Every structure is written in C-alpha cells, then in structure tokens.
Image: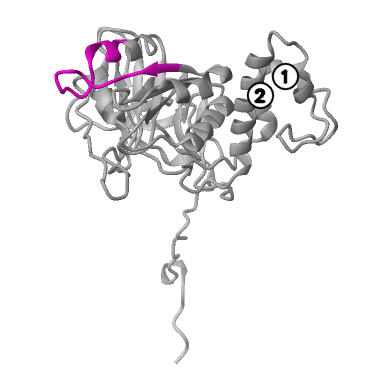
Amino acid sequence: MSPRYRDESDFRSRPSKRGSRPRSKQRPAHDEATTAFVTGIDRGRYTLLVDEGLPDERVVIAMKARELGRTRVVCGDRVDVVGDVSGDDGTLCRIVRITERVSVLRRTADDTDPYERIIVANAHQLVIVTALADPEPRPRMIDRCVVAAYDAGMRVLLCLTKADLADPEPLAAMYRPLGVEVVVSRRGEDGSALDAESVERVRAELVGRTSVFVGHSGVGKSTLVNALVPDARRATGHVNAVTGRGRQTSTSAVALRLPGQAGWVIDTPGVRSFGLAHVEPSTILAAFEDLAEVAAQCPRGCTHLDSAPDCELDAWATEDPELAPLRAARLVSFRRVMSARTEPAGRAD
C-alpha cells in the first residue's frame, strides 16, 4: 500500500512561548502623567497626594510600574503616575517615573556595606532628636547623622528632649560651632509629655520646610511628632530600665503635614546604627567653607585629623588671638565629625 498523500493540513505549527512579534525597546512616554507626592509606603502600596495644596487635593493609592525595575521609591519622592487618580475607594494607579530629587538622605548598614539605603528624598532639613537622659545621649550617633545630612546638602536641627532631667548646654555647645541649630524641649510641669512652649520652639524651625526626624528609639521622637501633628497618632514606647534602650514603635517612614502651616514632617523608624560607607571625606570638608579654604593649603593626602602632620587647620585655629577660642571649638567639632566617617559604626554610642 502506498503511503497516504500528505498536504499542509497534516502539519501543526506550535506557537513560540515568546510570541511571534518582536519586543520593541520603545516605552510609552506617559505625557499625560500626573505628578504626586509620596507620603507613605506599606507592603508594596504607595500612598500619594495628588494636586497638593489645591482645592481638589486628594489621596490615591499606587503601585510601582514594571518599567521602574529595582528603582526604589521612597517617602518624600515626587512621582509621575498614570491610571485612575480619582482617589475613590478601590482605585489603583501606577508610578511610572520618579522626578529629579533635590536631596537624598542615605545610610548604610555599617561602614563596610557598599549598599546604600535611601531613607527619604527631597527633604530640606534633618531633625536629630536625642534625649539628654533616659536614655543617655550618644554623641557619636549625632555626629554620624550630621555627616549624612551635610553629604545630602541638608540643614541640621538638633532637638534635645527631656531637658528637665539634665543640663542641655554641654551637648549643645559641641554642635553650635558646626552651624547646627539647637532647640531644647522639656516635659510640662503638669506631667504632660511636652510643654507648649517647647513644641512652639520646634514648630518655628519647621515652617516652610520638609523636615525628616531621626533618632534612637525611646528619645521621645514620636511623642514630639504627635505634639506637632496631633492627628499623627504615632505609637510611643518606653525605655527599658535594664538595657537603657527604647522599644522601636515606628515601622515605616511617613510624611505628615504641619497643621495650618506650610511644612511637612517625615517621621522615620528609630535607628541603632548609621553607616557612612557612601560618604567621601572630601564631601564633609566641603560643607565647611571656611575650613575648606584653609585646608586647600594642606599637604597632599592630609586627613585634617588630630594626628595629621603639618595640617594648616592647626595654625588657622591659633593665628588670631581674639578668634582663637571660637576657631578652636569649631575645629574640635569638625574633627570629631570627620573621625565619625572612619570609625566603626557599631551602636554609635
């Protein structure tokens, strides 16, 4: 029997798993995207504020578009979104683009970790909250936060809490020569967490700025945020009497509007270490224009620390007898901050 005649109907074409149409490298321009402000992040969902400051301002929920890949969206970012931006219940839009950042506050897990972690974006001011007692202040931690802020080009405000338990002046005197603004808060005489005058002093430094709050757990950071933004309802904790450490209560960064005034407060989780592997010493020096001008005359490779031979900063500190006390204090503070970049992060006690 001769073989059966075969035609094209006897053949079956198996479609390719990748599809027959070649992928295009062109991506949508999203020209009609809406710009929004990232106020919070929770398990892959982003809370955004659309039309900020306008009569139809509204909160929308978004997810990150696939084309952003591993690019991280953080609190404080300005982003472009597409999709349903009505803010109605059950709606979801997509973040397709991150606009250029004005500033980026970063840290690493320790001083050997090459991976940078962006804490917040587009903040004008870093507010370092530390208690004067219960728990004890940790100057090395403050130093590291100052370095990170100057690296980001941010203003620094040091807020000393629990001033009713200890004298704030010795610690404040360590940082004023660096150009750090210092405000002091104390607990109210009626037993309240903060007295009204203390809250107003801090509030005056926040108006017109986006300020990010950082500090160890238990220093009163969330208590201060709740006083500044009564609707915040940030959880507060207590200090362990045995370890002297606070219990972490904030679990994610969140942006809160300062009531009745132009300004944002970004509260962050408490931190125990602040790695500076991403910061170059030259960046720290550049933040102090008067010292940088003098240091330009130093020998090649000068570290500008106490152990550095022939450092021009030593002569500068003593050349004018009238200015010597102020210059010496500024130099000591600068070198302490500079050394924070080279010392192990640890607990930054």
Q: Residues within 10 Å of mark 2 (few under 14, many from 20)?
A: many
The quarter of the image holding the N terminus is: bottom left
As drawn, is 205 to the left or to the right of 309? Answer: left
Q: Residue at x 43, y 31 (%)?
A: 96
Q: Earlier in the sequence, mark 1 or mark 2?
A: 1
Towards the viewer: 207 or 341: 341
Asked if residue 50 is positioned above or below residue 111 in the image, the reply reads above
Q: Position of residue 94 (x, y in %)?
A: 36, 33
- Residue stretch rendered in magenta on the structure: 182-200
The amino acid on which the numbered mark 1 sits, given as a three-letter code, is Ala
- Give coordinates of residue 216: x percent, y percent: 37, 37
x and y, in percent, of residue 264 in the image: 35, 18
> Between residues 337 and 4, which one lies in front from this camera angle?
337
Q: In this figure, which residue is indicated by the disc labeled 2? A: 331
Taking the magenta stretch, the answer to whether it contains residue 124 is: no
Cα–Cα span, label 1 and label 2 = 7 Å
Q: Is residue 102 visible?
A: no
Task: Answer with the quarter of the image where residue 209 lies.
Answer: top left
Q: Is residue 347 left or right of residue 285?
A: left
Q: Kindly identify the residue that appears in the image at 31 percent across and 9 percent down.
A: 53
Q: Nearer the viewer, residue 318 or 196?
A: 318
The local crowd at label 1, few if under 14, some if 14 to 19, many if 20 or more residues have their Cα within 10 Å, is many
Q: Is residue 218 visible?
A: yes
Q: Are marks 1 and 2 in contact (CB under 8 Å)?
A: yes
The residue under the point 40% across, 25% down is 212
Q: Is 188 one of the magenta-colored residues?
A: yes
Seen from this angle, which residue lies furthest front? Answer: 321
Q: Label 1: which residue?
A: 317
With 289 as the anchor, is 277 left or right in this view?
A: left
